[in-house]
Image (cartoon, helix red, strand yellow):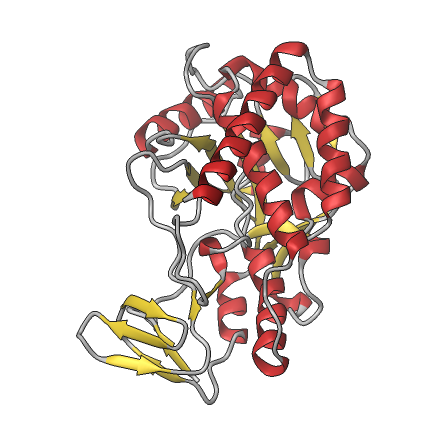
Amino acid sequence: MTLVDPHPDRRWINTYGMWTDEIPDWVPASTRASTSRAPVVVGTRRHVVDREYSVLDTGRLQDGLTLDGVSVVADSAVALTPTSVTLRNGAALSGGTVIDARGSAVGPGVPEQTAHGVVVDEETAARACGDESAVIMDWRRDNGADADAVPSFLYVVPLGGGAVLLEETCLVGRPGLASPELSRRLVTRLAARGVTLRGDEPVERVRFAMRPPAGPTRGVVTTGTRSPALHTATGYSVAASLRRADVIASAVLHGGGVDSAGSRAVNRLRSVGADALLSFPPDALAPFFDRFFEMPSTLQRAYLSSDDDVAGMSRAMLTLFSRINSSDRRVILGAVRRAVFSAAVGTRS
């Protein structure tokens, strides 16, 4: 087995948050930096989510994913076939299975998620969001953004050891909001809540594509954000990528495919939701998430976390559609029409 990575010794530094019930059993509980039992979402009002939310200790996770018996090549893959990899230095590698985990690059016209956060102590975080264990989304408009500007929300999660991440996040934009604007909004929001930053807090910056590259090489297995593990309406991918590792290992050892008809259908439905989010007017997002988090937790879970539950995903989307207003329904119907047209064009080409 060979791993190609341009920076194999680079340490992981990003914050990886996910619903606890998404984490596969083989990932040790010791890799969790924190677990919040009553996370909150704030749209136009407060919602307590009936699911645990965990943040991983990325150092422990990385150390636990050992490379024993793996040959590591410090280079980049520039061309792939189902059985070969061409490296940037011109060398070629061959194998029975090629797995593409190169991620998905941002670029013109590609939807992206961006965020700018600071790490503070628990006391400072409590002044910003009260006694909440975690805040997955806070859409209140106290961040100084204009009413017609691309909206952003506050994400608050404990990192363990008394540290808390406060992060201003653009869920999806084309392009996403730039880090300086998100930083300005975060400072404004915190000041409105009586919190003044010192200016020397550790900073986290996030920017990644919310779409896998078009036209993957036929026969090459994909994973990570280059695959259906990327939830194109939320940006989450880590837990799904960990689960996908089991499916890929089984396919390599025992044969069979990685992506089922169900997983492909779920991915298409997610893309409809992502297109709708890009099309909503700025003032529609907070009420939209009110309606979403008013649904039963089983339907929330089906939409946010299912890998191949087409029936559950469909029920969640139809239930939400029945609860939103007529203008939001028109936006979603437009996203459905575009998806159908795109599929028809893809079939003919």
Q: Residue at x 37, y 29 (%)?
A: 177
Left-right relation of 65 to 315: left
User: Which residue is most to the left?
Assistant: 89
Q: Position of residue 76 (x, y in %)?
A: 27, 68
Q: Quadrant of residue 255?
A: bottom right
Quadrant of the snapshot with the C terminus: top left
Query: Which residue occupies the foreground of this view, 347 or 29?
Result: 347
Q: Is residue 56 visible?
A: no
Identify which residue is drawn at 43% across, 11% down: 148
Of residues 309 and 83, the one nearer the viewer is 83
What is the total number of numbered labels drawn onto the structure image? 0
Q: From this viewpoint, is residue 198 visible?
A: yes
Q: Is residue 173 above or below residue 250?
A: above
Query: In the displayed structure, does residue 165 sit left or right of residue 102?
Result: right
Residue 215, placed above or below residue 4: above
Q: Residue 45 appears at what percent x and percent y?
A: 69, 19
When the figure is inspected, residue 53 is found, relative to residue 170, above or below; the finding is below
The extreme bottom residue here reads 69
Residue 244, picture quadrant = bottom right
Foreground: 198 or 50?
A: 50
| x and y percentages locating residue 210 in the rendered image | 45, 42
Left or right of residue 42: residue 57: left
Residue 179 at x, y percent in the picture: 33, 34
Split into 4 quadrants, where in the image is the N terminus?
bottom left
On the rendered structure, is 346 left or right of 160?
A: left
